[in-house]
Image (spheres, rainbow, N blue to C red):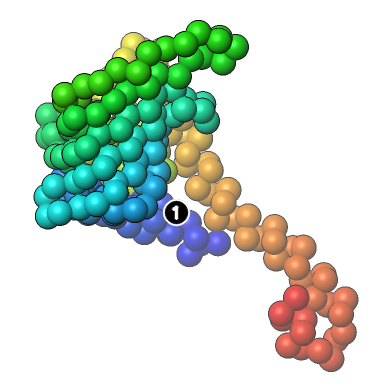
Amino acid sequence: SLFSVFINFYYAPAADSLYKNTLHNLVRDHPLQFLQPNVFIRDFPGYVIYVGARDGEQLKDFWVWEMNEGRTSLFLKARTGKFAYDEETDAIQLTLSDGVAEKYPDPGKEETLPTLSFKETTVSLSLERILGGTRGPKKWSIMTVQELLTARKDPTKLGFTGTPEQLEKIKFRAQMQIQKNLAFAFSILSMAALAVPFGIKASRTETFANFGI
């Protein structure tokens, strides 16, 4: 349990932060690695992307589905496209050229919406929605114990802003995360309390079987 406390409060948050930062830098420096030809890409929440071919930096035969609550709300098809990272918005900008767009009606409506052609259009894919972002406060799950204690005492030191009532809610949320990490670590004792009687019940001579149970 004490080892799990260390994992939950130190090692796991540090490893998760390092992973997200590394992946973020990879996407920023090499955004095309997110796209593989002839594969449906679902890494971007709210979108499904398909690329028919890739010739160096040039991407061809683009298909993009914009999803809303599990259904398609907009479909884009383009002859070519480009992928680039926009540092100002912390997002990948997908620029589509020579294509068509089909807007799907809302559920329950039978209206017929026209198919529109476009010379060029842009779709912004937020990295924050995928990786949690690297700007502003961290997610609770990747905060170390020092950061959680700081958030519980003075959230503004970690970049949180808001009214006094909102800051109080943030303090409460930090306390909840601390208790959650501790509860997960000490839940091992609950498992042992259940497992040991089952192991003893098998047979006192079957040591390895008992240990396995």
The residue closer to the viewer here, 100 or 17, is: 100
Any part of residue 147 in sight: no
197 up-or-down from 70: above or below: below
The quarter of the rendered structure image containing the C terminus is bottom right
In the displayed structure, does residue 120 sit left or right of residue 10?
left
In the displayed structure, does residue 101 sit left or right of residue 92?
right
> Tag 1, which secondary structure?
helix
The residue closer to the viewer here, 116 or 147, is: 116
Question: Residue 130: x, y in percent?
Answer: 34, 40
In the displayed structure, does residue 174 sit left or right of residue 80?
right
Question: Residue 102: x, y in percent?
Answer: 37, 22
The residue closer to the viewer here, 132 or 65, is: 65
Task: Say which residue appears at 24% left-offset and 29% top-offset.
Answer: 99
Q: Quadrant of residue 86?
A: top left
35 up-or-down from 160: above or below: below
Any part of residue 166 in sight: yes
Task: Say which residue appears at 47% left-offset and 34% top-offset.
Answer: 175
Question: Which residue is disc 1 drawn over?
Answer: 8
206 up-or-down from 88: above or below: below
Task: Say which residue appears at 47% left-offset and 11% top-offset.
Answer: 112
